[in-house]
Image: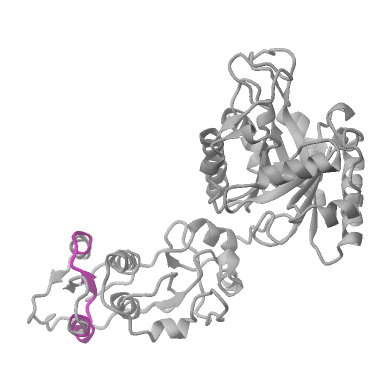
Amino acid sequence: MHLIRRALATAGAAVLLTTVLAACEGGPPDAEQVTAAEPDGLTAASADDVVAVSRFLLDSASAVVLVPERESDEAFARARDLGVPALPDTEEGRAEAERLGARILGPDEDAGAEAEPVERSEDVTVATTRSPSRALVDLVALGGATLVRIASDPRRHAPSARLLRSDPDGPLLTLGASGYAVRVVRANAEAVGGGWFATRGKHLLAMYGHPSGPALGVLGEQGTKASVARVERLVRKYRKVAPDEHFVPAFEIITTVAAGEKGPRGDYSARTSVKDLEPLVDAAEKAGIVVILDLQPGRSDFLSQAKEYESLLRRPHVGLALDPEWRLGPKGKPLQRIGHVQAREINRTSAWLAELTRRHTLPQKVFVLHQFQTQMIRDREKVRTDHPELSTVIHVDGQGSPGAKFGTWGVIRSDAPKNVSWGWKNFVDEDEPMLDVAQTWNRVRPHPALITYQ
C-alpha cells in the first residue's frame, strides 16, 4: 500500500473541526478558499511545512516525487496523477522520503503496478496560518485530511477560537500558530474576568499591601473576608462612573518585603511564607479576584525570589510584579536610595514566568513593572514584551500632588517599549490630595489597565 495513515495525536497538538472559518478583518480566509487555492511552487518556508505534514500524516509511502524550489506545475501534476506525495528536493525532504521507506521516482518513472488507494481518515485536520503551497494542499488531500486556515494567535480571532473549542480532543497539526495560544484555547483556560487575555479589554482594580497589617497598604487594614468585600465595593464604584467598561478586582500582595535588617539570608528582604499567603490567595480565587505577587528583593534578585513562589504562580489567577525601587546593589540598604534593575534581569524573570505559564497551559498572566523614575529600569528599551503568555504592565506608582503625579506619568510613558499596558497608583494617605474614582477615570489617560490603591 502506498501510504498508511498515522493514527496519532501529536503532543501539544489541538483539534480543529472542518467547519468553515468566518472571514473577518485581519483574519485568515475560510477553509473552502484554502482547499480550493492554486498556490505557487515550493519555497524554503513552505518546504518545511510539507515535511512536517508528511511526518504527521504518513507512516510510509512506496514512492515520492521530489520537487525543486519554485518547480513548475508539471511536477505537482505528476505526483497527483501517480497518487504519491510531492516532497521538497532538500536535505529534509530526502530524509523524509527515507523515513517513509519510499522510492524516489525519476523524471519518467512510474510508481508501479502495486500501488493501492490511500487509506483515508476524515477526522484529522491540518491548520496553517500561511498561504499553503501546492505540495501542501495535495499532500493533505492525498492523506485524507482537511486543510484550513487559522490565525497565528487564535485568541485574537474568534472564529479560530470557536473551532478549537468545538472538539478539543481530536488530532490536529498546526503550522505557524502559537502553540501556547492553541493549547490555551483548546483547554478553555480563560483569564480572570473572562477572555483569553489578562488585561486586554479590561481594567484591574487592585488593593495593595501585606496581610500582616495596615503599615504597608490598604490590603492589610482588614481581614481576608473584609478585603474581598472592600475590593468588590471599589469595582462597583468604578462601574458607576464607567458602566460600559469591564473592571476586574485584584489584590497586589507584597510577598517579599524590603527590610531594615539583613535577615537570615543577608539580603535585606523578608520572605512571606507560601502558607501565610494561601488564605488570601484562596479567597481571591474563589471570589474571582486577580492576585499579583509583588517582589521587593533587596540584595537578592527577582528571578531567584520568583522561583520561591512557583507553587503560587502555577495557579491560574496569580501574576507577578517586580518593584525595582527595592532592588539594591551588593552594598545597598533600603531607604538609602531608590533602587534599580537592568533589563536583562527583567527579561530572565519574564522568560521564566512565560515558560511556567506555557508548560502548565495557564491563562495569560499579568506581569507588572513598577517605575516612577527613569533610572529604575536601566536599558528599558531592551525589555522584552513579546511573550504571548504575559501581559506586561508598566505601573507608574509615584506619590504626591496630582500635578507631580501627572508629570511623572508623562515622563515614564515617554519612549516606552511597545506592547505594554499602563498602571496608576493612588496613595490613600500620601497623595495631596488623592484623586477620587471619577477623577482617576476621567483624568488619567490612556485609561490604565491596572489601578492600584495603597
Closer-to-camera residue (155/277): 155
Task: Write the start and end of the magenta stretch as one range.
Answer: 75-93
Residue at image coords 26%, 83% = 117
Residue at image coords 76%, 56% = 447
Residue at image coords 53%, 51% = 386
In which quadrant is the N terminus drawn?
bottom left
Instruction: Where is residue 311? Give x, y as percent.
Output: 64, 37
Query: Relative to residue 102, is residue 347 depicted above or below?
Result: above
In which quadrant is the C terminus drawn?
top right
Q: Is residue 120 magenta?
A: no
Instruction: Where is residue 4? Give x, y as percent.
Output: 29, 72
Q: Is there any visible trace of residue 192 in the rendered image?
A: yes
Query: Relative to residue 384, is residue 95 depicted above or below?
Result: below
Residue at image coords 71%, 43% = 395
Instruction: Where is residue 364? Give x, y as percent.
Output: 62, 52
| Label total for image | 0
The color scheme shown is: one colour
Quadrant of residue 404 in the image?
A: top right
Closer-to-camera residue (147/364): 364
Indicate left or right for 92 with 436 as reference. Answer: left
Indicate left or right for 20 with 142 as reference. Answer: right
Indicate left or right for 420 with 29 as reference. Answer: right
Instruction: Where is residue 144? Give x, y as percent.
Output: 36, 79
